[in-house]
Amino acid sequence: MESLENQNETLLLAIELINKASITPDDSGCQEIIKARLESCGFDCETHQMADVTNLWARIGTANPLVCFAGHTDVVPPGELENWNTDPFTAEIREGRLFGRGAADMKGGLAAMITAAEQFVAEVPTFSGSIAFLITSDEEGLAKYGTRAVVDVLQRRNENIDYCVVGEPSSTRRPGDTVRVGRRGSLTGTLRVFGSQGHVAYGHLASNPIRAFAPVLAELNRLEWDSGNEHFPPTSFEIVHLNSTSGADNVIPGVLDLKFNFRYSTEWTHTSLQQRLERLLRQYELKYELDWHLSGEPFLTHPGLLTETVVAAIRSVANLEPELSTGGGTSDGRFIAPMGADVVEVGLVNATIHKENENIEIHHLDTVCQIYKRILNGLLVDCRDG
Ligand SMILES: [Zn+2]
């Protein structure tokens, strides 16, 4: 480990968080550290423990607008330990990089948003509006008792978020090069196609579900669902599981099981996609059962004060012109956007997230902290003055 002397606050906090093995949905004490930091600079903190998930809602100020930082303390499992060059849960600095599970996704981002708020509140104690943190330990897992559940609590008491900055690692090479201004929807289907089992030598006495499904599969792969739009890439359809067997070489199987996922643009809603797919199944006269799971409808933050403020912050801190994108996977922004909040994701570089030897460049931590601080200035000081 290189010397920690003269290292900045953001790095020290990131290290402290990485050293807690908070594999989803276990918070492992991370939020106690965050809570202590935020309380000592004036935030009111509430812990919402729901099942095995720990959530933190922290707020300073009572006025509008409410600017919320959102993030998660949970991390994905480390994978194969022998492929790591360091202990995933002991942060290590090597050649200007910080290694450890969660360094990029997203304990580094959490540390940056906390030190940004601490510095901002100390420097501008008379800011207008309010600042909040919505932190969960259930982003990488089921996401049932996490952000979604806290949003329910907030909505019941009419506490509305106006602007939300999700500190997920949005960037490709340098912090701020990519800002996510929306996300595609995600919809999963679990399909069972029924045939009837029989002896392989007497095919006419059976009905093979693989044979019945083959032309549907071909058509599904051929279909162009849409060509995207101004803000979204085209809708994609992928099969993630396919199985049909009787277990024996001389038996035609009776059922075929399939799982698939749509990542869809605002050209569709989950119901219109479901209807389109079922129409196809009926067209081929399949006998089937189908269950759907909606992870989130697509959302889009239209150009406005939040996007302008974020772009200006990145220009001034990082000297970059960010790309505004709706690509990538889903995030907890999908639960916050339906409150009517404008949501963006901006944070560290995502090159090593969920991989072995996850790491970030150390100096990026300070860049991200400064970007977050500039965003607070833009939304809670400059607007008031201007
Ligand atoms: Zn994440």
Image (cartoon, helix red, strand yellow):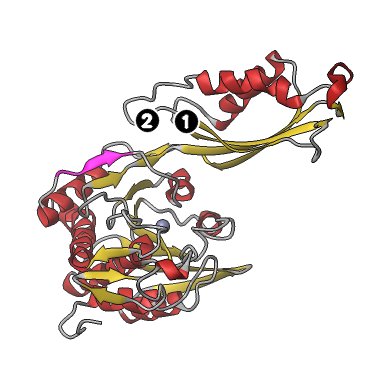
* Residue 289 forms part of the magenta stretch: no
Horizontal side of residue 112 vs 343, given as left or right: left
Q: Decide: few, some or many residues near mark 2? Use Cα within 10 Å; few <14, some 14-19, many ≥20.
A: some
Q: Position of residue 235 (x, y in %)?
A: 45, 29
Q: Residue at x 68, y 20 (%)?
A: 281
Q: Secondary structure at mark 1?
A: strand
Q: Amino acid at mark 2?
A: Pro
Q: Decide: few, some or many residues near mark 1? Use Cα within 10 Å; few <14, some 14-19, many ≥20.
A: some
Q: Residue at x 41, y 66 (%)?
A: 83
Segment tinted magenta in the rendering? 321-325
For the residues marked 2 and 1, what is the alpha-carbon distance in whole angstroms? 9 Å
Pointer 1 residue:
236
Q: Which sits in the foreground, 123 or 274? A: 274
Q: Is residue 64 visible?
A: no
For the N terminus, give its image quadrant: bottom left
The image shows residue 279, relative to residue 263, as above or below, that is above
Pointer 2 residue:
233
Q: Residue at x 22, y 61 (%)?
A: 368
Q: Main secondary structure of the magenta part?
A: strand
Is ligand 1 closer than 8 angstroms to the Cβ of mark 2?
no
The part of the image, by quadrant, that contains residue 217 is: top right
